[in-house]
Image: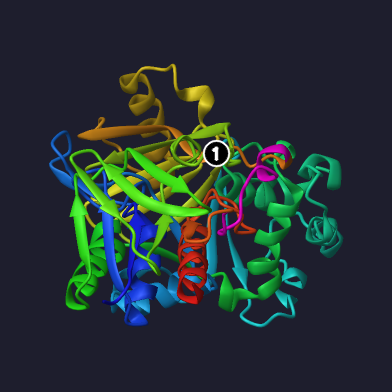
């Protein structure tokens, strides 16, 4: 009989692993504890706004090669929207100054020499001060590696690194920040074009489930893994409550579950144990004509505003400071800034505020050092997830890369 590879978890890391395995003709069963796929990257109907909204605003970049390959495989790339070039709009709320960062396509960054394309008030020397991040060791923070001040840091590096690391950048891992720099700004505008999924489930999840079904894979919802039978250096069985699945010779398991669950299933497994929150807000109102697909906001509570045909959505990273505020207070504060940025004179429209307390692991050097690789000490057990050692912070790109890596190891078994 053909072997079976069991994927535990139908988030993006688990789905990407399953897609890769079925592409190679493997028999795959995906076990998902919830009644829907997608994990932290999914859409759902929200009664408060009477809209289908995303549980978070997840930005992709054109240079995210694993994510781009994933959506091309799914045939859903048309659902990614964004400007035709690597343009990033910003506004400074206190001064009301607006500008657009325009990064040229090639690797030679001549845009830094053009006052109309770079950060206002910046010089080439300001950008060069970020270069130490590229070669930083894993034990250094951003604050220990560069001076966290100046126009380029305040108006470019800080908002971009805060979004990527989900932690106040000076406390964050310099190595992870350097990885972001290498794959974005240093790769040129062709790798930096911002892309937003017009519905996370529509673009990233449902097409994957359809493709898996076409390839004969099974996806079992409401199937929570209770325990792994780990003996003799391998996974012997999966304990799914009323269902116990014995793994035959050649079978394997890919564990694609959150970092607070994985160590309870695999004794002694290292994993990050500190997390940071993200707050997202959604407002049912059509964006003004010519409003950019996304805009960075400096000097306020809001950090990024995303425009959809039927709503304006906001993301605030490193948001632990906001968790104790009431949802009503948050909605009012956020809307006042959104209305100011968008030039909308309207009362608070129908809204929803989503607070994710454990949105990502805390991207500090200490927590980064706890991230395990895809292989384990058990011969037929592999790990996937944006919290594993992908070389990137907890991002969609990292999640998909981790699934691909785990699948590749399982294929070699």
Locate residue 136, reporting x and y percent: 82, 54
Q: Which element is circle 1 on?
A: loop
At 58% from the left edge and 31% from the top edge, which residue is drawn? 274
Question: Which residue position is annotated with label 1?
Answer: 93
At 55% from the left edge and 73% from the top edge, which residue is drawn? 63
Locate residue 279, reporting x and y percent: 42, 35
> Looking at the image, which is closer to me, 131 or 26?
26
Magenta stretch, main secondary structure, is loop
Q: Does residue 198 appear in the picture of this structure?
A: no
Which stretch did the figure color magenta?
366-376
Q: Is residue 163 left or right of 43 when viewed as pictured?
A: right
Q: Does the stretch in magenta take in 166?
A: no
At 61% from the left edge and 80% from the top edge, which residue is drawn? 105
Locate residue 52, reporting x and y percent: 18, 49
Judging from the image, the colouring scheme is: rainbow
> Looking at the image, which is closer to me, 70 or 7?
7
Q: From the viewer's perspective, is residue 150 above or below residue 65?
A: above
At 45% from the left edge and 63% from the top edge, which residue is drawn? 403
The image quarter containing residue 206 is bottom left
> Looking at the image, which is closer to me, 114 or 294?
294
């Amino acid at each position: 009989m053909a072997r079976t590879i069991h994927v535990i978890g139908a988030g993006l890391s688990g789905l990407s692993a399953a897609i890769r395995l079925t592409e190679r003709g493997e028999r795959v069963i995906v076990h998902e504890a919830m009644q829907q796929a997608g994990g932290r990257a999914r859409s759902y109907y929200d009664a408060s706004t009477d809209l289908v909204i995303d549980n978070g605003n997840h930005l992709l970049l054109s240079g995210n090669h694993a994510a781009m390959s994933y959506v091309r495989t799914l045939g859903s790339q048309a659902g990614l929207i964004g400007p035709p070039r690597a343009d990033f709009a910003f506004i400074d709320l206190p001064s009301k100054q607006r500008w657009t960062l325009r990064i040229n396509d090639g690797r030679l960054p001549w845009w830094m020499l053009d006052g109309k394309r770079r950060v206002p008030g910046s010089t080439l020397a300001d950008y060069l001060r970020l270069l130490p991040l590229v070669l930083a060791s894993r034990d250094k923070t951003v604050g220990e590696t560069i001076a966290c001040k100046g126009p380029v840091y305040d108006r470019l590096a800080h908002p971009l690194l805060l979004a990527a690391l989900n932690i106040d950048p000076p406390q964050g891992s310099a190595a992870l920040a350097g990885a972001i720099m290498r794959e974005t700004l240093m790769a040129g505008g062709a790798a930096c074009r911002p892309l937003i999924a017009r519905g996370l489930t529509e673009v990233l999840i449902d097409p994957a489930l359809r493709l898996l079904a076409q390839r004969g894979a099974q996806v079992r919802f409401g199937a929570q893994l209770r325990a792994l039978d780990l003996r003799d250096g391998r996974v012997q069985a999966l304990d799914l409550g009323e269902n116990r699945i014995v793994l035959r010779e050649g079978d394997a398991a890919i564990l694609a579950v959150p970092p607070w669950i994985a160590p309870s299933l695999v004794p002694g497994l290292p994993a990050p144990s500190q997390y940071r929150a993200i707050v997202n807000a959604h407002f049912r109102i059509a964006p003004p004509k010519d409003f950019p697909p996304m805009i960075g906001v400096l000097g306020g509570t809001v950090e990024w505003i995303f425009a959809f045909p039927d709503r304006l959505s906001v993301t605030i990273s490193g948001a632990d400071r906001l968790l104790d505020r009431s949802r009503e207070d948050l909605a009012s504060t956020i809307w006042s800034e959104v209305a100011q940025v968008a030039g909308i004179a309207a009362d608070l429209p129908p809204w929803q505020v989503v607070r994710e307390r454990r949105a990502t692991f805390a991207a500090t050097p200490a927590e980064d050092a706890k991230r395990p690789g895809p292989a384990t000490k058990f011969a037929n057990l592999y790990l996937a997830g944006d919290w594993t050692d992908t070389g990137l912070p907890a991002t969609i790109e990292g999640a998909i890369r981790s699934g691909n890596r785990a699948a590749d190891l399982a294929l070699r078994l």
